[in-house]
Image (cartoon, grey):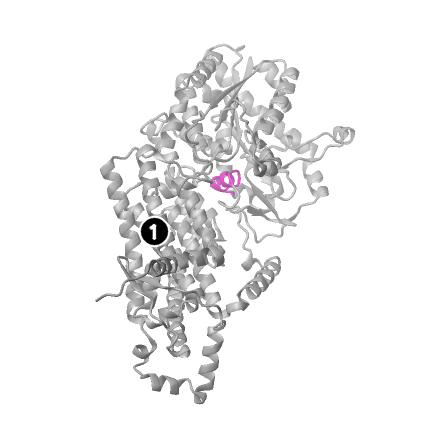
Amino acid sequence: MTAQVSGEARFKRLLYFFPFQLLRLHVQRGYFLLLFWVVLFGFITESFATKFGIPHLFLAPEYRGEVGIWSFGILGFSLGGFIMAFNIYVYVRHSHRFPFLGTLNRPFFKFCVNNSIIPLAFVITYLYCSARFLMVSELKSEWDIAIDLLAFLGGNALFILIAFLYFLPTNKNIYKITGKTEEEMEELYSKKNGALRRSYRWYLGGRNRKKWRVETYLTHPFKVALARDSSHYDVNTLRQVFFQNHINASLFELLIVAVFVIVGAFQFNEYMVIPSAASACLVFTALIMVGSIMRSWLKEWTFPILLALLLIINHLSGRYDILNQANPAYGLDYSVEPVPYTIASIDSLNGDLLAVREDKSLQEGILNRWLSAERKRMGDPRYKPMMVFVNTSGGGLRSTLYTLQCLQHCDSLSGGTFFRNTRLIAGSSGGTIGAAYFRELYLRRDSLEPGIYHRSYLDKASNDILNRVMYTLATNDIFIRFRHRHLAGHRYVLDRAMTFEEQLNQNTDFVLNKRVSDYFDDVYAAQIPMMVLAPSIVNDGRRMLISSQPISYLCYEYPEVVEQLYLARENVEFNRMFSAHGSDQLLLTSALRMNSTFPYILPYASLPTEPPIEVMDAGLRDNFGTKVTAQYISTFQDWIEKNTRGILVLQVRDVEKHFEPTGGQASILQKLTNPIGSFYGNYFNDQDYNMDQLMRTLSRNVKVPIHQVPMEIMRYPDQNIALSWHLSALEKQRVLQSIEFPNNQASLERIVELLKD
C-alpha cells in the first residue's frame, strides 16, 4: 500500500523542484549568463536594435542568398552550441551546490534536462516570432515556414546530440571511469599520492559552499523522481565525480574553441559563410566557454586574473601591433616612413596656392570639355546646360539600393541627360556605394547586357554583405589575427574589412575592383562625373577628401580669411598627403569602405601618419556630401554663372526630411536619458538644419538658380527599414516601392522638367 503524501510535502516537492531551483540560481547568481539570454530575447522579440536590423538576422537568417532550410538549420546548430555552453558553464560553476547529482548515473545529462527552462522558453518564443516575421516580412507560405522551423529544430537537436555523444560515455561515476573499487579509490587519494590530492583539492576550490535543497528532479523530460539523499555518501567520493565531470567538460570546451578558430580559416569559402545570427551565437558561445574554462581552473581568482590580463594587454597593445592590429587602406604602402600629421604639416599641405591654381585649371578644363560636348550635341555654341550634382546619404544597404534605383530612374526618364550633366557625386556610406556602382555601369553602358537600367543590378546591389563580415568577426577578429593576404601588391592582415570589400566585389560582379586613380582619364575626358569621398578623421574631426582628380581647391583657405575669421583647416587631401605611400594605388572598394565605416561593424582604417590617424563614416560630419558640393560650387562660381543656366542638386535620402514631431508624457527613466537620447536621435536632423542654412547662403550668392530636389525612402509606421548591410525581402520591396510615392514622383517630374533643353 502506497503511503499518502501530505499537501505540505507536495508543496515542498514543487517548491524544491530542481528546474525551479536552477532558475532561482540563475536569477540570484547568474548575471553573466542571463545577460546573454536577455540580449537574445531582445533580438527575437524585436525589443531593441531594430533600427540596425539585428532582429531580422535572427528571425529570417540568410545563407548563400536564401532564407531557407539551410540557413535555419545552421542557426539552430549554432544555437545548440550556445545552449550547451550555457549548460556546461552552469554545471562547472554550480554543480557542487547540488551534491545529489553525484549519486546519479549520467549526472551531466540529467543536469541539462533540468536546466532547460530558459533554453526551452527561448526556442518556443523564437518559433513564434520567426513564424510571424516570415509570414509578414518574407512573404512565405505556411508550409515553407513549417519546413524552415523544423530545420531550425533539427539543427539545434543535432548539436546537442553530438555533445551528448561525447558526454554520455565519459560522464560516469569515478569507479566506472577508473575500474577501481571504493577502497582502491580511497587508496589513490591517500597520503601516498599527495601531489594528486593537492591538485584535486585546489581544483575543487570552494567545497564548503552552501548546498541548495532539492526534493524532486526530472530524470528525463517526462518523468519526475525524488532526489536521493546524499548525506550518507562519502563527501570526497561525490566531489571526485564532479571533478571528473568538470575535466570532461573543460576538454570539450577546449575542443570546441579549437574547432571554432580553425573554421575561421575557411571564411573565403562561400559555403562556410554562415548566417550573421549564427555568427553571433558563435561569439556568445566562445565567450561563455572561455569564461567557463577560466572559472574551472582559476576559481575565485578568475576575476582578478582576468582584470590583470586585460590591463596588461591594453597597455601592451599601445606598443605592439600584434595585439592591436590596425586596419589598413588597401593599396597604400605602409612600409614607407609615416608622414607627420600636425597643424603645421596640414597648413603646409593646404597652403600651396600654386597647386590650387593648377588643380582649378585642370577641373575647369574638364568642365569646358563637358560644356563643349553639350553644345555640340545641341548644335548651339551658346547653349547653357543644367549642371547636376548628386548628394546621397548614408544608410547601409538601403541607401545603396535606393541610390542606384534613383539614378537609374532619373537618367532613364531624362533620356540620358541627367547623368551626362552630372559633374560631381558626394555623400556617405551606402549611398556612395550605390552611386559608384551606377557610375561604373554607366562607363560600361555600351558593352553591358542587359542595359544599365535593368532590375538585375538592383538585385545585385542589395545582396547581403553582413553575413561574411560577421562570420569573420566571430571566427577571426575576436582573436589575435595572424593570417595575412596579398592585396594590391602588398601584404595585409586579414580581417572583416577585407571580407567586406571581397563581398562587395562579388555582389557587383567585380566591376568595382579598380583603383580610385583608374577613373582619372574618364573624369578628365568629362565622360563620367568626379566623385569625392570624405571619411571623417576620428582623431580630430577633420575630413579626408579622396578623389581620382587633384582637389586641393576644396581644402584651401586664403590666409587673410583664415586670420580674419580665425578659421581652422577642416579638410585634408588624401592624394597629396600620402603620395609617397602610393595614394594612386588606393583601391576604390577601400575608399568606399572608409567612407562607410560604421563603428564596430567595420574597423576604423588607420592611415600611415605620425601620430597615426583613423577614419570612419563620412556621415559623422556630412551625411549628404552637401559641404563638398557647396565648396565646389563656391570655387567654380564664376564658371558656373557664365556657362550654365542653373544647378540641380539631387539629394537622395534614406529617410524623409519632413515628418510630424512625436511627444507624450515621459517616464522618469526617459527624462533621465533624454539629454543623451535627444542628441543622438536628432543628430542627423541637426545636420539637415545646418546644411539647409549653408545652401540658403550659397543660393543668395550664386547668380544662377539652385534647385535641390529630394528623393526619399518613405517611412513605414509598422516597421523601420534597417540601417544595416542586410535587408529582408520585405525591406527591399519597401525601398523599391518608395520611388512610386507621390512626393518622389513629383521630384522625378521636376528633374525631367529642369533638364529639358
On the image, the x and y values in percent for residue 757 come to: 47, 10
Please give left or right for residue 15 compared with residue 152 in the image.
right
On the image, the x and y values in percent for residue 370 come to: 51, 21
Query: Is 594 one of the magenta-colored residues?
Result: yes
Choose top left, top right, bottom left or bottom right for residue 282. bottom left
Tell me what residue is drawn at x 34 percent, y 83 percent: 182
On the image, the x and y values in percent for residue 724 come to: 45, 38
Disc 1: which residue: 120
Callout 1 amino acid:
Leu
Does residue 286 lie above or below 51 as drawn?
A: below
Please give left or right for residue 158 compared with residue 712 in the image.
left
Q: Is residue 544 visible?
A: no
On the image, the x and y values in percent for residue 686 come to: 60, 28
Tell me what residue is drawn at x 72 percent, y 29 percent: 558
Query: Is 111 one of the magenta-colored residues?
Result: no
Choose top left, top right, bottom left or bottom right for residue 266. bottom left
Task: Describe the element under mark 1 as helix, strand or loop.
Answer: helix
Does residue 541 lie above or below 366 as drawn?
A: below
Q: How many marks?
A: 1
Tell me what residue is drawn at x 53 percent, y 43 percent: 599
Q: Are there few (<14), some (14-19), or many (20+) residues within 10 Å of tag 1?
A: few
Tell me which segment is drawn in magenta: 586-597
